[in-house]
Image (tube, rainbow, N blue to C red):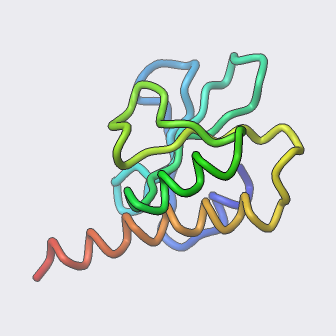
Amino acid sequence: MEYCCNKPEVSYDTPFGPDTLVFRVRNKIFALTGLTEPEFKVNLKCDPEYAIQLREQYDEITSGYHMNKKHWNTVKFDGALSENLLKKLVDHSYQLVVNGLVKNKL
């Protein structure tokens, strides 16, 4: 969670109730996680083709739970995936949202 908070212009809140923490960049969601779940999992935005590749390669990455399955993955942060890969996935999600914000301003 600290990694998400250290990114530029990030805020966090619980708009879906006290059990779900949402991370936003300029008010657009790039990550969310359940706070009462026994397993620590995070939903992250993902390029659709890359999302499919990740799901095929890693059992810990599945289609986004309660999200658009094409654009979101649920990622288990249970120690099976490397910290480097987890940070890369967070960065990818954050950057997709930032890129979308830039396009919307044009």
Nearest the camera: 12 or 106? 106
**Viewed as shown, does residue 47 lie left or right of 105?**
right
In the image, what residue occupies the spot 83% across and 60% down?
Answer: 83
Q: How many labels does the image show?
A: 0
Residue reaching furthest bottom?
106
In the image, what residue occupies the spot 36% across and 62% down?
Answer: 26
Give the image location of residue 33, x and y in percent.
59, 34
**Viewed as shown, does residue 5 lie left or right of 104?**
right
Give the image location of residue 8, x and y in percent.
53, 73
Residue 46 vertical placement versus 62 (above, below): below
Q: Is residue 6 visible?
A: yes
Q: In which quarter of the image is the C terminus?
A: bottom left
In the image, what residue occupies the spot 77% across and 24% down?
Answer: 39
Q: Is residue 12 visible?
A: no
Residue reaching furthest right?
79
Nearest the camera: 85 or 51? 51
**Viewed as shown, does residue 81 lie left or right of 41?**
right
Residue reaching furthest front?
56
In the image, what residue occupies the spot 37% across and 64% down?
Answer: 97
Give the image location of residue 28, x and y in percent.
34, 54
Q: In which quarter of the image is residue 16?
A: top left
